[in-house]
Amino acid sequence: MLNAPARTPVPSTYDALLDDLVASTGRTVPVPTPSTGETLVELPRSSADDVRGAVSRARLAQLAWARAGFARRRDVLLRAHDLLLERREQLLDLAQLESGKTRGQAFEEVFAALSVTRWNALKARSVLGGGRRRGVVPVAVSTRVRYRPKGVVGVITPWNYAVALAAMDVVPALAAGCAVVQKADDQGALSILALRRAYIDAGVPEALWAVVAGEPGEVGEAVTDEVDYICFTGSTATGRRIAEKAARRLVGASLELGGKNALLVLDDVDAEQAAADAAYACFSSMGQLCVSAERIYVDRRVAEPFTQALVARLSDPRIGSGFDHDADYGSLATASQLERVRAHLDDALAKGARVLVGGRHRPDLGPWAFEPTVLTDVTPDMRVSTEETFGAVVSLSVVDGETEAVLVANESEYGLNATVLSGSTRRGSRLATQIDAGSVNVNEGYRGSFGSVDAPMGGLKQSGIGRRNGREGLLRFVDPVTMSVNRRIVGLPHSGRDFARMIPLFILLARVLRGIRRA
């Protein structure tokens, strides 16, 4: 049941937001809403010149922002946090209109933005404040480390979690004293502009955070050509190209890329609870989430009751994108997403896979609505086995014991997120340490690690490099600078005779420090 939103924000809301986009070409593209397929907004297009202009203005703004200091940046970010709370309904509406997700899953995004803003506002000084380090000769030489903002950060974000992923990259960059030029995906631009407006109204200078939109080959390339550090979230193929360009320019990059995330169901689970956890882990935002599960491995001893419970839970899914909490599952976001899901499903069925539940396009519920789909008898030659589907289709395989489950989970070239479902948190935690992934959740699909903004998030293997969130997420936006002062308490050697006289003293110093266990 359930399909179109109960209300639509007035067009003047869009006009006010679009005025904030850096776009001078005069061209627009229609952006549809998944709820009806109708055009939501005509989005202006930016050019490479728009990007270069935005970067130039951001550089000037960044100088003053860095000098403003941690206290000023903390106060601005905390005001932005409060404005996000006040404007949450608008952000929820836009996130749903652009992505087709449910109200509850849109709230996950807004809550993540709040958490990230609060954490970075309150922790930036302690993480980036620098401090004393041991000098080469204790007392005689003093050494300090300070952290220098990298400058202008380029942020390239996808459509699927536009609010959360933008906040996770932009906010720590601002807290560190950097400026940001962000390329928004067309399907998430309004959400990003509404998010940005809260920070601007809180006191972030307009030029410090610029948003552009346009073709990746022009606008995306211009961003990666001009900035001092690059944050990218998207496909592994695109991430490789960005990494190559960053390497040629000798600038840093953090890349959160694809995944083929595994979910392990151990033999001690409660079948009904495990089915509920698995359904959400796989089909939140209809699987259009980098950390959602796409491969289920269930122990043979619990396979039958778990599979029955999962099929029962998904047999009559409440699909919709209304501005309420009636729906459990949303829509695929675009026609191309529907095409990709169909292609993976058709390939699997042609090669012998079976549908346990779902498998149907539901145009009666929305132009790109698709039932949550679970396949079995999936073999390695099927696209759904190894490629990231990113939507609505998962495979279920039976394994004999936890050792086999870990082995098959680790066979993937990806290593972004994983899930272990167990009746024993101790056992689940033990297995979690054996899985090759940047984050592993026990008895939860992804929200535990995704929402823990004090901890780093990122991938292993082909799932990316670098980390967002936590100390690691802040430190990527600064360069450490070491400053050392010779107090002239002990003269350091300059000549051969000086070395001959002082080497025994340095040897004694090394032995003393070793004896008292000082580094």
Image (cartoon, rainbow, N blue to C red):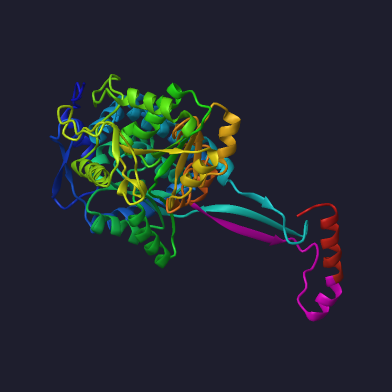
Q: Which residues are magenta?
A: 478-503
Q: Look at the picture and state if 301 lies above or below 131.
A: above
Q: Where residue 502 sits: x, y (%)?
A: 84, 71
Q: Is residue 200 left or right of residue 94?
A: right
Query: What number of labels is visible?
Result: 0
Q: Where residue 406 sits: x, y (%)?
A: 51, 43
Q: Is residue 146 left or right of residue 264?
A: right
Q: Where residue 285 sits: x, y (%)?
A: 32, 33
Residue 425 quadrant: top right
Q: Is residue 1 left or right of residue 294?
A: left
Which residue shows up at 40% across the image and 66% down it? 249
Residue 374 quadrant: top left
**Foreground residue among 395 and 133:** 395
Any part of residue 38 in sight? yes
> Magenta stretch containing residue 483, yes or no?
yes
> Magenta stretch containing residue 417, yes or no?
no
Q: Look at the picture and state if 349 lies above or below 89.
A: below
Q: Look at the picture and state if 330 lies above or below 340.
A: above
